[in-house]
């Protein structure tokens, strides 16, 4: 059985809610999904790619809709320093 982990990613990759608003959002989500194993907020210090695992459905340019699948993996490795 696989897990479903929804993530909210804002359009502005550098925006973060205040800690108070994050706490309010967690409280709201806990009422919407009372059976969830865990509901939490977390903040990153840098722009991050979250690998969806088996739920991958490709990647397209958000501006023009062009398919970026061919070069995406290499770009992610380069950006993360894995290469």
Image (tube, rainbow, N blue to C red):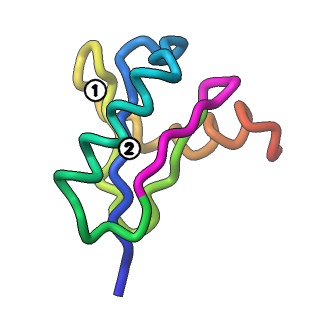
Question: In what element is the residue under mark 2?
Answer: loop
Q: According to the image, label 1 marks what residue?
A: 66
Q: Could you say which quadrant of the image residue 59 lies in?
A: top left
Residue named by callout 2: 7
| 25 vs 60, nearest the viewer | 25
Q: Please report the bounds of the magenta region as a residue range.
A: 39-47
Question: What residue is rendered at 62% in x and 39% in y?
Answer: 76
Q: Is residue 21 left or right of residue 44?
A: left
Instruction: From the top left corner, tell me how far across and down residue 3 is, in percent.
Output: 38, 73
Q: Give the structural element (helix, strand or loop) at label 1.
A: loop
CB atoms at circles 1 and 2 under 8 Å apart?
Answer: no
The residue shown at (20%, 52%) is: 31
Q: Picture coordinates of residue 11 (x, y %)?
A: 35, 16
In this rendering, the label closer to the viewer, 1 or 2:
2
Q: Position of residue 77 (x, y in %)?
A: 70, 43
Nearer to me, 67 or 28:
28
Residue 17 percent across, percent down from the top left: 45, 17
Q: Residue at x 29, y 21 (%)?
A: 62
């Amino acid at each position: 059985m696989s897990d479903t982990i929804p993530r909210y990613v804002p359009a502005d990759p550098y925006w973060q809610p205040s800690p108070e608003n994050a706490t309010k959002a967690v409280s709201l989500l806990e009422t919407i999904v009372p059976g969830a194993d865990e509901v939490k907020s977390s903040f990153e210090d840098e722009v991050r790619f979250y690998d969806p695992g088996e739920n991958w459905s490709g990647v397209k340019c958000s501006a023009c809709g062009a398919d970026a699948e061919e070069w995406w993996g290499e770009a992610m490795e380069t950006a993360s320093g894995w290469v």
